Image (cartoon, rainbow, N blue to C red):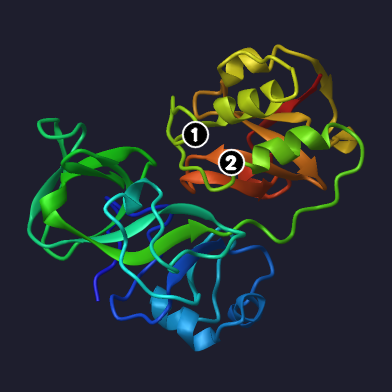
Amino acid sequence: MKSLLMAVAVLAASVLLQGHAVAAGYELYSVQPGDTLTSVAAKFGVSSSEIASLNGLTDPSRLTAGQSLAIPVRTQGQGEPSSNSANGGNAGGTAASSRARRVGWLGETIRAVPIRRTPGTGAILYKAAKGTQLVVSLEQRKFYGVVMVDGSIGWVDKTAIQVKPIELAVEPPTNVPAMVGGRPEVVREAFRYWGTPYQYGGRLPHRVDCSLLAQAAFAAHGIRLPRTSAQQIQVGFPVGYAELLPGDRLYFYNRQGRIGHTAIHIGGGKFIHASSSRGYVSMDDLFTPQWWRIYAGAMRI
């Protein structure tokens, strides 16, 4: 069994896929605080041993918040992906659940091949050996676009990849707090992009970064924000963490001590953001040490 290699893995290096798995598709679930393998298995109606085996868990008793798990999804029907499946074609019953956001199709190299920055002649990003599993998300003439670990797209000659009828998707969260007051409509707009791959300077609908997500969510409701986090923090008025409401914008320092990240508060300290560490739009908690120590403040319009 070969893993989704870190250089070309989508969302998390912990995800492993088996070519002989019987599931029609796989959802990627982000482990929440308090989750156990048993509770996750019960949530999706599969066995604990199946999840442990699929993800190569050597110690199933230890799950880490934020860890991504591949969850098998069984659907009715069979079929092969059509020629345009990488661009959203129907694979004949192999789709993941309707709750999940599709990331791409599982592909496997049938020979050694370079992954390039642009189709055909671009700089080589990675040299994939025969049998490397990739996530195919785009199609352009003679090339497939595959998801790199930072959310960017690399390009591979179509003749070097076998696209399998296995779809990968990101499962939306189940522990979203109730939204009271504020701008819940902005939060709901942000959740429309759940699972969208992160890319610095990305363009929607295919790639997004933190400030673009905030800009798009507010623009949908007639509120214009500048493009960068450093500019956005100048808009509105500050609010204390004890007064946070849904739709308030949270800001964080980068390693240089400047404003380098933004998120949208949901409620109860939870926020949605385009996460560079997870590689996609996801949910986190302000009051965890990771985020609280770099928290710069919140702004409201």
Neighbour class for label 2 at 10 Å: few (<14), some, many (≥20)?
Answer: many
In screen coordinates, is 145 left or right of 205? left
In screen coordinates, is 135 left or right of 77? left
Q: Note whether 272 is above or below 40 in the view shown.
A: above
Q: Note whether 149 is above or below 35 in the view shown.
A: above
Quarter occupied by the N terminus: bottom left
Image location of residue 292, percent across then percent down: 69, 41
In screen coordinates, is 210 left or right of 72? right
Quarter occupied by the C terminus: top right
Q: Quadrant of residue 182?
A: top right
- What residue is disc 2 on? 193
Which residue occupies the foreground of this view, 190 or 276?
Answer: 190
- What residue is disc 1 on? 205
Sequence-wise, which precedes: disc 1 or disc 2?
2
Q: Mark 1 is on which residue type? A: Pro
1 and 2 marks in contact (CB < 8 Å): yes
Image location of residue 74, percent across then percent down: 50, 77
CA separation in Å, label 1 and label 2: 8 Å
Q: Quadrant of residue 239?
A: top right
Q: Is residue 59 visible?
A: no
Q: Mark 2 is on which residue type? A: Tyr
Neighbour class for label 1 at 10 Å: few (<14), some, many (≥20)?
Answer: few
Which residue occupies the foreground of this view, 62 or 105?
Answer: 105
In screen coordinates, is 41 left or right of 17? right
Q: Note whether 87 is above or below 186 in the view shown.
A: below
- Residue drawn 56% across the image and 18% down it: 228
